[in-house]
Amino acid sequence: MKTIQTLLATLLCLFTFGAQSQNDFKLPEGYNEERPNAKIELDFDGDGAKDLAIAYSDEEGASKIAVYFASKWAVDKTYYSFSWGNHTTYKLSFSNNSLYIDLGDDYGYVFTSFKFTYDSDLINFRLMNYSTTEYMLHPRVLLSSKNLNLQSGEYSIDGGSKKIGPQYFINLSDIEDNAYLLKD
C-alpha cells in the first residue's frame, strides 16, 4: 500500500510540474479553429520553452498573424500580432532560426510570403524577406510580383530590381507601421 501511495504521489508531482512548465497562451480574440488557420509551437528563441505562432482568418475574413514568446508571455502576458490582407490558406514553418509565413487563397490567385529571423538582442523576429505574387486565373498569367530582401536591400517589382538604400529593420512589433515599404 505504501508503494502505491508513493507512486501516486510521484505521478501527481510529475503531472503538476509538467502542467506548470507548459505555456497557457491565451489565443487572440477572433481566433476560431473552424476558420482557416495554421499553428506552429516550437522553441523559437532557444530558451527551452515552447513558443507559438498562429496565422488565421478573423470573423471578417482578415488575415492575422500572432507570435508568442514564452519568456515574454510569462512576464507581461503580451504577444506580437499584425494583420495582412485577406487570405484563406496559411502555412507556417520554422528552420535555421527563421519563421516562414506563407499566405494564399483557395484559387491560387495571390501568394504572400514572409521570412522572419530571430534576433536575440531584440528578443523579437526581424523581417528578412517579403514577397508577393498575383496571378490572373484564366488563362493563368502572372500579373505582378514584388520581392524585398531586407538583408541586401534589393527590391524588385515585376522583374526589374533596384536598391532601396540603407537596410531597413522591421520587427514583428512594427510591421504594420512599415507596410508602405512592402505594399507599394
Image (cartoon, rainbow, N blue to C red):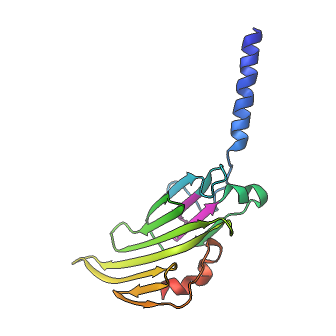
Q: Position of residue 109 (x, y in %)?
A: 34, 74
Does residue 10 appear to the left or right of 62 in the view shown?
Answer: right
User: Quick check: 52 above or below 133?
Assistant: above
User: Quick check: 26 above or below 103?
Assistant: above
Q: Main secondary structure of the magenta part?
A: strand
> Residue at the spot x=61%, y=62% of the render?
67
Does residue 68 appear to the left or right of 153 in the view shown?
Answer: right
Q: Position of residue 120 (x, y in %)?
A: 66, 65
Q: Residue 56 magenta-drawn?
A: yes
User: Quick check: 62 above or below 150?
Assistant: above
* Magenta-drawn segment: 53-68
* In the image, farthest residue toward the left: 139
Q: Position of residue 10 (x, y in %)?
A: 73, 24
Q: Nearer the viewer, residue 89 or 91?
A: 91
Q: Nearer the viewer, residue 94 or 29?
A: 94
Q: Does residue 23 appear in the picture of this structure?
A: yes
Q: Quadrant of the N terminus?
A: top right
Q: Position of residue 83 (x, y in %)?
A: 56, 73
Q: How many marks?
A: 0
> Residue at the spot x=48%, y=64% of the render?
100
Q: Residue 163 magenta-drawn?
A: no
Q: Nearer the viewer, residue 10 or 162?
A: 162
Q: Does residue 85 appear in the picture of this structure?
A: no
Q: Nearer the viewer, residue 12 or 29?
A: 12
> Residue at the spot x=73%, y=11% of the render?
3
